[in-house]
Image: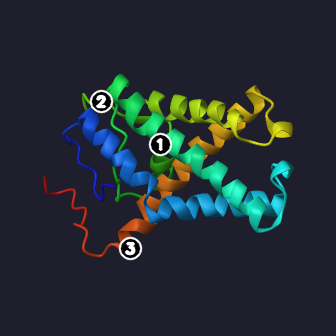
Amino acid sequence: MLFRSIPNAVPLTAKQKFKLAGKTVVDPFTFLFVAGGAGIQQAQNHFEGYGQGIEGYAKRFGAGYADTVAGTFIGGAILPSIFKQDPRYFYKGTGTKTSRSLYAIANAFVCKGDNGRWQVNYSNIVGNLAAGGISNLYYPAQDRDGAQLTLENGAIGIGTTAVANLFQEFVIRKLTPKAPKNDPTKP
């Protein structure tokens, strides 16, 4: 995670993109997001084939974590290496809460390329759709409806990226008081 926007950040190598993806999937916040999503699915009884109780929750958590791992490695390492895109979120830190919120959400759909220019975030969008397609392999049989499950899980993955960006923009800074302060007057 970056804590301040660096306009001319050095692009990551493919190896660094994979290393970042690996760290992301074992980050405690990743487990919290997945646990929260599994809890919501449990409460709403989504994917009934998983059942209820601890076993049902564990299956939902496992499927959600598998979606996250697939989406993170495909959309945060493999495709960014191919498309030459930067998978990092660049903290804005200045402006109104509305402008910062819109910036964070937009970063689920646009990203910096390795050339430093903003572009469509094909890596995140296609990566989450690919992970949604893979999820047809392990969701309950009655919920494997191909395109609908793929699009639903892909949209959830993209939405999760937007929520994670908002979290980084507004919460992480408060949890890391030793992080360098964002001062736009300093290079």
**Residue lying at 26% horizontally and 41% vertically, measured from the top left:** 16
Q: Which of labels 1 and 3 is toward the front?
A: 1
Q: Which residue is mark 3?
A: 174
1 or 3: tag closer to the N-terminus: 1
CA distance separating discs 1 and 3: 25 Å
**Residue lying at 24% horizontally and 74% vertically, measured from the top left:** 178
What residue occupies the far top of the structure in this picture? 82
3 or 2: tag closer to the N-terminus: 2
- Looking at the rendered structure, the kind of residue marked 1 is Thr
Identify the disc placed on residue 56: none
Crowd around label 3: few <14 · some 14–19 · many ≥20 (10 Å): few
* In this picture, residue 59 sits left or right of residue 171: right
Q: Which residue is mark 2?
A: 117
* In this picture, residue 15 sits left or right of residue 89: left
**Residue lying at 36% horizontally and 68% vertically, measured from the top left:** 173
Residue 96 makes an appearance in the image: no
Crowd around label 1: few <14 · some 14–19 · many ≥20 (10 Å): many
Q: Which residue is mark 1?
A: 72
* Image vertical order of residue 144 relative to residue 180, above or below: above
* Nearer to the camera, 158 or 117: 158
Q: Quadrant of residue 45?
A: bottom right
CA distance separating discs 1 and 2: 22 Å
- Looking at the rendered structure, the kind of residue marked 2 is Arg
Residue 16 makes an appearance in the image: yes
1 or 2: tag closer to the N-terminus: 1
Q: Quadrant of residue 41?
A: bottom right
Element under disc 3: helix
